[in-house]
Image: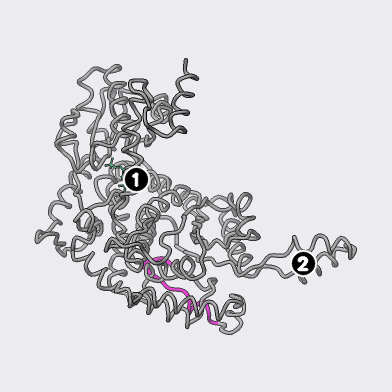
Amino acid sequence: MIDTTTAQLEKLVTHHRVNENRQTLSLFDENSDRFSLFSAHCGDIVFDYSKCNVSSETMGLLLELATKAKVSGKRQAMFAGEPINSTENRAVQHMALRNMSDAPVMIDGKDVMPDILAVRKDMARFAEAVRSGKVAGKGGKFTDIVNIGIGGSDLGPVMATAALGPFHDGPNTHFVSNVDGADILEVLKKVNPATTLFIVASKTFTTQETMTNANTARQWLVNALGEGAVVNQFAALSTSLDKTSAFGIADDRAFGFWDWVGGRYSIWSAIGLPLMIAIGSKRFDEFLSGAHTVDQHFETAPDNQNLPVLMALIGIWHRNVCGYDTHAVLPYDQYLHRFPAYLQQLDMESNGKRIDVNGKSVAHETGPVVWGEPGTNGQHAFYQLIHQGTSVIPADFLVAAEAAEPVGDHHEKLVANAFAQTEALMVGKTEAQARKELHDKGMDANAIDKLAPHKMFPGNRPTCTFLYPKLTPFVLGQLVALYEHKVFVQGAIWNINSFDQWGVELGKELAGELLPVVKGEQKAMGRNSSTVGLVDAFHAMRK
Ligand code: G6Q
């Protein structure tokens, strides 16, 4: 017997088949008020999904899917601190980190808010002391912060620090993540050891890349200033505070968090320290408040007005019903240039799963490939495929009403491009229109026959637009939390655990096994001939 979710997805597939030739544009002709019907608000953000090929009947079926998949009960379980990360037996409570109300948050019968507030207070005290110069390096006030972390301990701070560039009035921040020595080398070339603070960000404090970079940075500092500098110029962000002190980091410079904070959901925790130092603790609080607003909306708004639910359902329509494999995120906001990379981890690490919570293979597709680049740059590169390629690529457009830093009429031009793209993707251009245009330009019939097919656009390519007043800390907090909860809702519907990441383990294990082989300390015996051949060729090239 198929489960109710699969049965509902099948209903949706039938509905899609019946409406196969439906043009989104004609849906606007049928209902002149389509924008109000197919858009919703949360906090400062307007979400317009009217340019997707969905009718009221489609949305009704999708909302029924959310009900049948018991999204609401699963959401309640997450907010109640139940161990919904079942393969690691952990609660999922990043919302507590941005709980700006007085309400307690219980995990395992304990209110976790006092610990959260204590760490946030310590972080703020330290961040403000670094910003003012009260906490300083051997050479005086810190001019540079180097955050060493990877994955969830890197992408959030990198993305948010870039996004909030106009609010950055603290020391310069640099991020080192890759085990490729070039990453740390290029940063160390730019900074002065006497005025640089290193922050080692690692939930486990065992990650190979991070510990390798941290040790390289430590040695570089010790070479320049002596062993004594470590205690003064290193801080740590981790759940493993025993390991941070073993590294030589002073206890009052080690900021903790907890195992119920997933790496890719940790920007709200101590992992946010480099952002806090960059923009100040008050603005960091505004960032948390933005996310908190979305948490409240997500918990209480009815499904048909609930942005994360709607975002998730539109995504499911495209992925499971229409069969589109990828999802593009296109910020028309240069400061969000790392947002697609951030969402790539959030979405693909959370929902790139093929086994459900009961250990069975899923009966449907799960997370799409998420990718993107800021507009307008992408328009001059890969949009060709989005407009005229054989794959349909649903895309999110993110647009600010006001520029974070206005320059002449740049912003109006940027916004005109964003709106033009979403319209062009939906409207397209028929061959008859293309022919008429060419004819009006005086082209002869023969040339028109040849060129017209290339000038036609199929249209009907779905886009969602997020419009927000301006990219402030508060708005950024809202945007990130919206996508986090979208990922949760999709995981709930697909019945997978969005909060583990076993898929990254095998590569790590094999890298550990291969290191002595690559170093020439062991032979690559018993491995496949490709790996053996590559190892041999590698050693031959280095001779
Ligand atoms: C995120 C992942 C992963 C993790 C990194 C770094 O959800 O678990 O990206 O954040 O592997 O781990 P550490 O913070 O433990 O160094």
Q: Residue at x 24, y 45 (%)?
A: 270
Ligand 1 closer than 8 Å to the CB at disc 1? yes
Q: Which residue corresponds to mark 2?
A: 434
Q: Residue at x 30, y 17 (%)?
A: 224
- What amino acid is labelled 2 in the image? Ala
Q: Is residue 139 above or below residue 370?
A: above
Q: In front here: 409 or 159?
A: 159
Q: Quick check: which quadrant has ligand 1?
A: top left
Q: In front here: 232 or 384?
A: 384
- What amino acid is labelled 1 in the image? Val
378 on left or right of 446? left
Report the span colored magenta.
Answer: 33-45
Q: Residues within 10 Å of mark 2 (few under 14, many from 20)?
A: some
Secondary element at image label 1: helix
Give x and y (percent) for residue 259: 20, 50
Q: Residues within 10 Å of mark 1 (few under 14, many from 20)?
A: few
Which image quarter is the N terminus in? Answer: bottom left
Ligand 1 closer than 8 Å to the CB at disc 2? no
Q: Earlier in the sequence, mark 2 or mark 1?
A: 2
Q: Which residue corresponds to mark 1?
A: 504
Q: Residue at x 47, y 70 (%)?
A: 317
